[in-house]
Amino acid sequence: IEVACSLSADRAVRLDVVGPGPDLDRLRARAQQVGRPDLRIEVHGAVAALVRDQLYAHADALLFLPRHDEHEFEGLGLVVLEAAAFGCPAVVLHCGGSRFGVAEGETGLVLDEDAPVDAIAEAVGTLIGCARTRASARAYAARFSLAAWQQRVRAISEGGRPDWQWPAHP
């Protein structure tokens, strides 16, 4: 929500917050406090797959900002790849496995875990309207399709090497 507030200083912004969790009431309360004319925030909670896919298809960027917490740790973060399949680039934090869903600079951006709100907003701003990044996101996500995985497994079983590896993130 704070990133959307920062972005709305010079453009109209729509933020859709999707997913279940214990923070929904807090997020809804914060969204109601914002009250800016060029910022529309909707906290959906859990949504049907069709609605989720429509949101991905129309989004300029996905913000996936997990942080280390003593009780919670993000594994792979498949949401990043789901969004990429619809051409939606992502801004993620270098935390947990979500960074592996992004080919840095091609399908989105990976920021330091302690990146400030303004840096995250700037990263989102660089992705908005970038057709190359959207196309790269779709192509990258295709590498995770069932057919692509089956092809890699066949290559390995036949003694070959798959033509793919995870992107390197320091």
Image: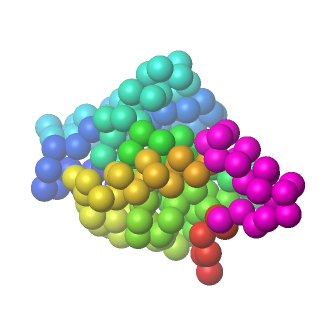
The residue lying at 70 percent from left, 48 percent from top is 151
The residue lying at 36 percent from left, 69 percent from top is 119
Indicate the position of residue 131 as horizontal and vertical percent values.
Answer: 26, 54
Indicate the position of residue 16 as horizontal and vertical percent values.
Answer: 38, 35
Quarter the C terminus occupies: bottom right
Q: Nearer the viewer, residue 140 or 51?
A: 140
User: How would you classify the magenta stretch by its main secondary structure?
Assistant: helix
Q: In this view of the protein, can residue 29 be seen by the observer?
A: no
| Drawn side of residue 7 relative to residue 96, left or right | left
For the record, the magenta segment spans 145-163
Q: Residue reaching furthest bottom?
A: 170
Q: Quadrant of residue 97?
A: bottom right
Q: In this view of the protein, can residue 98 be seen by the observer?
A: yes
| Drawn side of residue 67 relative to residue 154, left or right | left
Q: Quadrant of residue 132?
A: bottom left
The residue lying at 53 percent from left, 47 percent from top is 142
The residue lying at 79 percent from left, 51 percent from top is 153
| Drawn side of residue 28 relative to residue 156, left or right | left
Q: Nearer the viewer, residue 36 or 90?
A: 90
Count of marks overlaid on the render:
0
Q: Is residue 157 magenta?
A: yes
The chosen color scheme is: rainbow
Eyeballing the image, is 53 above or below 69? Answer: above
Indicate the position of residue 70 as horizontal and vertical percent values.
Answer: 76, 58
| Drawn side of residue 86 relative to residue 147, left or right | left
Q: Nearer the viewer, residue 29 or 158?
A: 158
Q: Is residue 8 magenta?
A: no
Eyeballing the image, is 78 above or below 19? Answer: below
Indicate the position of residue 112 as horizontal and vertical percent values.
Answer: 52, 73
Q: Quadrant of residue 35?
A: top left
